[in-house]
Amino acid sequence: MEPRSSKHPAETDGDVIRPPAAEMAAGPHSTMVQDSPDCDVIVADARWHGAVPGIAALVRRTARAAWAGDEPAPVTIALDCDRTIRRLNARHRDRNKPTNVLTFDYPDGIPGGDIMIALETVRREAQAAGRPIRHHLMHLVVHGILHLRGHDHHQAGEARRMEMEEARILGRLSVPNPWKFRPGSPSGRMEDAQ
């Protein structure tokens, strides 16, 4: 399997899909919230509850907004730690380091997928960008859903289109545009402030 951005297909054993989020749901400290047929939230690292009050409802609301205009597909959003995300990043993308978000398509055209988000990386990035952690989390949920909807950011043009769509969706959620100028960032882009 060739990694494509932060988007990668889930693994299969014959006809059985083994999405990465399933590993997280089995953890002894995991909390799984399923009150929507289209969005399961797994809080695999309990520190997320302290970092973002009302996190499961916030993540589901953000995911619904990101699907607006498209038929929602089943998605599992797992909130875990850098160590777990680093392990998945090494296994699926040959990058032995944590990243903020990983998105996994289900295989063979099955709609939906898994989105994994790393607490420590999100916290560091939010602090460096001078943003509330909840806003950065919402941005990464939108980013992951847009990958599942077929968006990508390998080329400048597609990256710009994806950024504009992220800003539009986040604006509907009353979250400031993450791509606007940030103090201390040479280009004004969020990742330059990190």
Image (cartoon, rainbow, N blue to C red):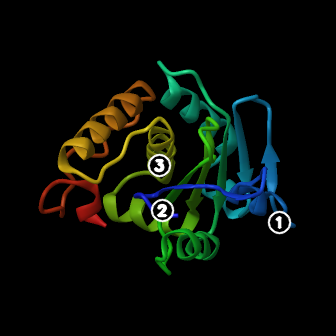
Q: Quadrant of residue 34?
A: top right
Q: Is residue 136 left or right of residue 63?
A: left
Q: Earlier in the sequence, mark 1 or mark 3?
A: 1
The residue carrying pointer 3 sits among few (fewer than 14), some (14 to 19) or many (20 or more) residues within 10 Å by Cα, namely many
Q: Which residue position holds label 3?
A: 140
Q: Which mark is residue 27?
A: 1
- Secondary structure of the residue carrying tag 2 is loop
Q: Nearer the viewer, residue 169 or 18?
A: 18
Above/below status of 92 relative to 70: below
Q: Is residue 33 left or right of residue 64?
A: right
Q: Nearer the viewer, residue 103 or 124?
A: 103
The residue carrying pointer 2 sits among few (fewer than 14), some (14 to 19) or many (20 or more) residues within 10 Å by Cα, namely many
In this view, which residue lies farthest toward the top? Answer: 69
Q: Amino acid at mark 3?
A: Leu
Q: Which mark is residue 100?
A: 2
Q: Earlier in the sequence, mark 2 or mark 3?
A: 2
Residues under numbered marks 2 and 3 in contact, where contact means CB atoms less than 8 Å apart: yes
Q: Amino acid at mark 2?
A: Asn
Q: Quadrant of residue 10?
A: bottom right
Q: Residue 32, position in %: x, y? A: 80, 48
Q: Amino acid at mark 1?
A: Gly
The residue carrying pointer 1 sits among few (fewer than 14), some (14 to 19) or many (20 or more) residues within 10 Å by Cα, namely few
At x 17%, y 54%, the residue is 188
Q: Quadrant of residue 44?
A: bottom right
- Secondary structure of the residue carrying tag 1 is loop
Q: Residue 99, position in %: x, y? A: 47, 67
Q: Residue 70, position in %: x, y? A: 50, 22
At x 50%, y 73%, the residue is 98
Which quarter shows the C terminus?
A: bottom left
At x 63%, y 31%, the residue is 73
